[in-house]
Amino acid sequence: MEPREVDTAQAIADRIRIERESRGWSLSDLAERSNVSKAMISKIERCEASPTATVLGRLSGAFGLPLSTLLALAERADERLLKLDHQPVWTDPETGYTRRAVSPPNGGMLDLIEVMLPPGVRIPYPASAFAFQRQQIWMLEGLLHFHEGDTLHILEPGDCLELGPPAPCAFKNAGKVPARYLVVLAKR
């Protein structure tokens, strides 16, 4: 194998192990979920065997990830620093809602998102938006009314809320100044 192929094979092996361990799965658990033998998964994770596209497809399916995502995560494994001027920012042209992806794109199991919500703006999300992740909201500035199903949480600077089971939610800036908060996402 060429050096680049060895690096890629090792990155894929490492990513499969990371995905499995982050879910608290044993080799047997992954074998059962993917229909790939425990011995083959072990060889792949030790970089003693190169998985076929079919095997990678089965493993990525067991993780609930598209194959392209699993490979992209493997390819970006050593991107651990994301400077402020390289953090992607998206602004909703209708509301002015701004979202900054703070975390490096290395596919870790944790994502940090900084949000700025203008006064009076309300952003609703369906329960499905929260199905495959755990989430916390840490209020940095302003006032946020967070509707989680039928429950209203009023968040002020310094408050931190861990979301419960997936439910329809809405973020609303009930104050007169922009609300700025950090969303911490952990993949399930």
Image (tube, helix red, strand yellow):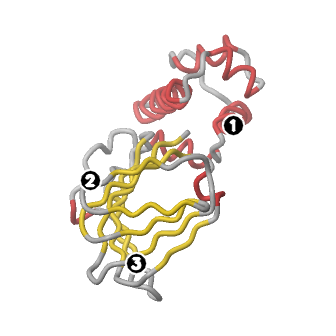
Inspect the image, locate mark 3, and give the three-letter code of the amino acid beneath it: Tyr
* Residue bearing mark 2: 82
First in residue order: circle 3 vs circle 1: 1
Alpha carbon separation for disc pair 3 and 1: 40 Å
Please give the name of the residue rendered at 33% of the width and 58% of the height, measured from the top-left corner. Answer: 182
Residue 1 visible within the image:
no
Q: Nearer the viewer, residue 47 or 18?
A: 18
| Residue identified by numbered label 1 | 53
Q: Which label was assigned to residue 75?
A: none
Using the rendered view, name the quadrant where residue 100 is placed.
bottom left
Q: Is residue 177 left or right of residue 173?
A: left
The numbered disc on residue 97 is 3
Q: Quadrant of the C terminus?
A: top right
Q: Residue furthest toward the top?
A: 39
The answer to which of marks 2 and 1 sits earlier in the sequence is 1
Q: Kindly report the distance in space between the C-alpha atoms of the residues bearing marks 2 and 1.
A: 31 Å
